[in-house]
Amino acid sequence: MQNREFQTEVSQLLHLIIHSLYSHPEIFLRELISNSSDALDKLRHLTLTEDGFKGLAFEPRIDLTLDEEAQTLTIADTGIGMNEEDLVSHLGTIARSGTKSFLNHLSGDAKKDSNLIGQFGVGFYSAFMVADRVEVISRKAGEEQACRWESDGKTGYTVDAAEREQAGTTVIVHLNEEGKQYANNWRLQEIVKKYSNHIAFPIFLTYDKSEWNAEEEKQEKTRVTEQVNAASALWRRPKSELTDEDYKEMYKGISGDFEDPLFWFHTKAEGSLEYTTLFFIPSKAPLDLYQSDYQGGVKLYVKRVFILDDSRELLPQYLRFVKGIIDSEDLPLNVSREILQQNRVLQSIRTASVKKILSELKTQAVNQPEKYAQFIAEFNRPLKEGLYGDFANRETLLELIRVKSSLVDGVTSLAEAKARMREGQKALYYITGGKEQLLRNSPLLEVYRKKGIEVLILDDDIDEIVFGTIAAYGETALKSVNNAGAAEELKDESDAPKSEGLEPLLARIRGILGDRVKDVRASVRLADSPSCIVRDEDAPSLQMQQMMRAMGQANVPEVKPTLEINPDHAIVKKLEARAEDELMVDAAWLLLDQALLLEGIPLENPGEFVQRLNRVLGQTV
Ligand code: ADP
């Protein structure tokens, strides 16, 4: 027998589970059943695809056995099983960074924290909420030797050789004080029905049943084994037979989420291809949605048989928050991952599924605006990722996303913004390159405000990249106000003579700033600020350039900003008269530096900025 210690993270997790996650201890059963169901899925898949396993007698089932006297509950399956190596790596370490991040996200509020538990696959360890000791006896399919793992969930565990008649896993939960309530067949049946009713395999419960013996006139106990779950693939049943409660239950069973889903879309396609899809949109985005090892929640079945759950093949990456199933009649059962990548049937199902999900969301936006707002609060950003990658659905995605705006509170759709366009307005305008407050206060918005034209405030960090690739929304051009040319079309007739008069001052500033700027010119977009920074069409913003350099991109082209000066501003008017004065040196740099500050760009030399400011102040006080 070998004694081993848990990886630090496991100990940390166990400590938390045992000491603070008591609000729903019953979920331990759902977690263990779900592990068994996965193990059965895996073995079934092997028996269909791997030569060595084909034809193997496979009787998938999950057996719960209650021993009231010994106060143990046993969960046994005929699934793929684990050998010693598997036991050590699966039940002694935490591999996924998602789980590690779970530990960092704990709030200390036991209720909230226990809601997180399922999302991070800490499933097995939840048994220690109700047990003071857990034994796992497992034999891997295709191997002879079984192995026994045992732990009290404190410091470590032991592994040693064991015997098991056939492949599969038996988990023996030695119930503790907290767990005693589960040594009750009614309670167990209730929990299985609640969480695991639609697990595709039969779940049996063996227990002592009390029955009234009429002849002998007394209660009698008999040992019985009964099936407790419906074991039906719910998605294959007609929609008309299913209630909202059925869908919600199934969602909770497959997702480990405690909250109801926001929406679900159940479709049966019957045509050249036959398949069923059932997709759920969670009400909250998982915390690890943006981590590289995030696991999507869509499973592929062929004729009710689980095939794989690699969502990357099943839905585009940006829809990774969708949970559910795709069940096809046309794919071969022994289809492999490699074949799937080029499989036409799957490609068609995938294309149709994406269209379906997006069009259903569009319908919900109209029919259930409040729920849709909740959806947007969680998933607006992944949709924007789709704008960048999914060209085929770009128009629909542009309908679905929501953005902030200079004219309205909260968020707005592009369609609403388009409906608000002023007469003669040539494009929908937007601003990018910083946090919301910075953008709202940007001098670049002044001319639009003056003319009552709406500007969309795109403050998400991916907005600049995403919208930089989108030239139009339908027939309407989408233009960034950060671009040098954007304000040209708003020019008034009075602007031209004003800028001509400004030329001597501009020339002086050009001379002072030298090659720090691309050009200095008169602005038509400013009302209250003396100066602002603009950039060429197609050039990345200064913020973006900074970000690219920070991310180690070596050859970011240095794009120099163009400084625009407001001919109507009182300071500029006074400076016009003093274009040749010594004061202009400080003034020119201050005009540039303040424009950079408003763009959110840190100054290269703040000390110099302060000295200049003080010199100029010194002349006025
Ligand atoms: P998760 O199920 O989210 O991966 P768990 O901690 O519940 O996390 O389980 C860890 C791993 O242990 C599983 O991924 C699986 O490989 C293995 N495992 C757990 N239970 C079983 C079982 N009944 N049969 C086979 N393997 C299992």
Image (cartoon, rainbow, N blue to C red):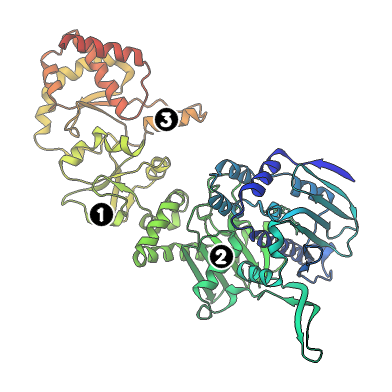
Picture quadrant of ligand 1: bottom right
In this view, which residue lies farthest toward the front?
Answer: 217
Label placed on residue 251: 2
Of pointers 1 and 2, the one earlier in the residue sequence: 2
Label placed on residue 545: 3
Q: Position of residue 418 (x, y in %)?
A: 25, 54
Q: Residue at x 42, y 30 (%)?
A: 545
Residue 448: quarter of image: top left
Vertical placement of residue 103 versus 581, above or below: below
Q: Residue at x 38, y 54 (%)?
A: 401
Vertical placement of residue 144 versus 579, above or below: below
Which secondary structure lies at badge 3?
A: helix
Vertical placement of residue 230 versus 105, above or below: below
Residue 186: quarter of image: bottom right
| Residue bearing mark 1 | 418
Give the amino acid at mark 3. Answer: Gln
Please report contact status of discs 1 and 2: CB closer than 8 Å, yes or no: no
